Image (spheres, grey):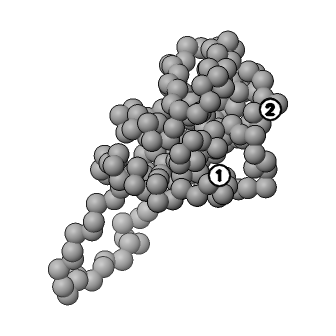
Amino acid sequence: MSLIYIIEDEPIMADCIASAIMGVAEEPVEIAVFNDGVSAMAAVSERLPDVILLDIMLTGPDGFAFLNEMISYPDTAKIPVVLISSLDLSKRNLEHYGVKQVLDKAKMTPEDIYAAIKTALSAPAEAAIAIALTEAEVQVEPSVVPELPKPSAPISTPAPQPGNTPINLNDFKERLAASQDPHAI
């Protein structure tokens, strides 16, 4: 069963999207609806969704602030995202955010929503297959690897990486508030 997060601040639109998914889904899905990025990020820290449907123009921190936070952690950066917006985002390169597709709120149908979800869900599997093939093709001969010189001074331990620690909700709220710009799109 796939877990789908819908992040939409208009309750009627969120209900329509959830109903559309349930109406055309070929297999059971679990849907969680959030009206802002802060509550969605708190839920992400508890359980990773399989795909996120995200409105860009949210009340409070916008969808791009949420996406920036998502890509800052290795485990959440891999979650596929489908943007649902009335904005024209066709000229933007959104791949680095994990965006698989952009749906126009005014024109999308239940079938469009479900097709975008299926495409987003299949993308990680294709990437995993490609990575597995690449790793299987790479053969390293031990004799080819040069021996590295011993360091002259002790090596300091690197700082912990964000993906190795739980998401701190207070830090996230502060980062979202600092990055919020109502005119940035």
Q: Tell me if residue 131 can be seen.
A: no
Say which quarter of the image contains residue 152.
bottom left
Most foreground residue, 75 or 169? 169
Residue 100 at x, y percent in the picture: 66, 42
Asked if residue 81 lies left or right of residue 91, the reply is left
Residue 99 place in picture, x, y as percent:
64, 45
Please give the label number shown on residue 147: none
- Point 52% across, 26% down: residue: 33
Q: Which of marks 2 and 1 is in front?
A: 2
The three-letter amino acid code for the residue at tag 1 is Glu
Return the x and y of residue 121 as percentages of the image width and height: 60, 32
**Which residue matches tag 1?**
95
Residue type at tag 2: Ala
- How far apart are the alpha carbons under marks 2 and 1? 23 Å
> Residue at 40% across / 50% down in the picture?
172
| Farthest right residue in view | 107
Q: Where is mark 2, residue-wise?
A: 106
Element carrying mark 2: loop
Picture quadrant of residue 184: bottom right
Residue 28 at x, y percent in the picture: 55, 13
Left or right of 66, for residue 92:
right
